[in-house]
């Protein structure tokens, strides 16, 4: 509910950036200005976090959120031994269409995952 004297506040059309509570109303009944008491605003969304991959040689590469890469002909082709997701906001997926009928591995945790069956066999990677 809006503070007393507001009349008939409409919820804001978009979440209020950087606040956790709704605001007061202006004379035209639009919610503005974040203040304690109204309860309708939401914190801004957390931006997606990139994923990563590592090789047995100790090399690491960032995989940009929303991107997929075919590694054929690239130094990274068939060298990835570990993968890391973005900790819930991003997941990494690696696969090889030519290995065991398209074997793949999916991982969302921000902790490094040691690939077992897929180690050294990754030809494609996505971070979603």
Image (cartoon, rainbow, N blue to C red):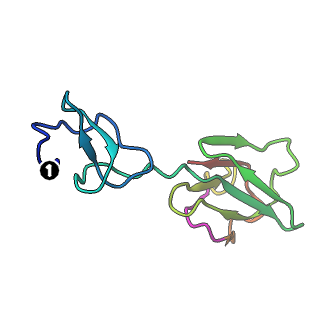
Q: Residues within 10 Å of mark 1 (few under 14, many from 20)?
A: few
Front-lying residue, 89 or 53 = 89
Residue at the top extreme of this rendering: 28
Front-lying residue, 36 or 80 = 36
User: Image check: 117 left or right of 6?
Assistant: right
Rendered image quadrant of residue 79 = bottom right
- Residues in magenta? 103-111
* Residue 106 shown in magenta: yes
The picture places residue 1, in percent across and down from the top left corner, at 14, 50
Q: Is residue 48 above or below residue 57?
A: above
Front-lying residue, 48 or 91 = 48
Q: Is residue 113 above or below residue 11?
A: below
The picture places residue 26, in percent across and down from the top left corner, at 23, 33
The picture places residue 50, in percent across and down from the top left corner, at 64, 52
Residue assigned mark 1: 1
Residue found 64% across the figure and 41% down from its top: 67
Badge 1 marks a residue whose secondary structure is loop
Residue found 75% across the figure and 58% down from its top: 121
Residue found 74% across the figure and 52% down from its top: 62
Q: Is residue 27 above or below residue 125?
A: above
Residue found 20% across the figure and 27% down from its top: 28
User: Image check: 112 left or right of 10?
Assistant: right
The picture places residue 63, in percent across and down from the top left corner, at 70, 49
* Residue 119 shown in magenta: no
């Amino acid at each position: 509910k809006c503070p007393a004297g507001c009349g008939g506040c409409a919820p804001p059309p978009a979440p209020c950036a950087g606040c956790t509570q709704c605001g007061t109303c202006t004379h035209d009944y639009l919610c503005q200005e974040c203040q304690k008491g109204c309860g309708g605003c939401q914190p801004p969304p957390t931006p997606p976090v990139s994923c990563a991959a590592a090789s047995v040689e100790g090399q690491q590469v960032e995989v940009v959120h929303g991107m997929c890469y075919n590694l054929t002909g690239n130094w990274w082709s068939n060298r990835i031994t570990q993968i890391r997701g973005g900790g819930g906001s991003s997941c990494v997926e690696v696969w090889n269409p030519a290995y065991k009928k398209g074997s793949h591995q999916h991982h969302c945790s921000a902790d490094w995952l040691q690939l077992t069956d897929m180690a050294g066999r990754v030809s494609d990677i996505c971070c979603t």
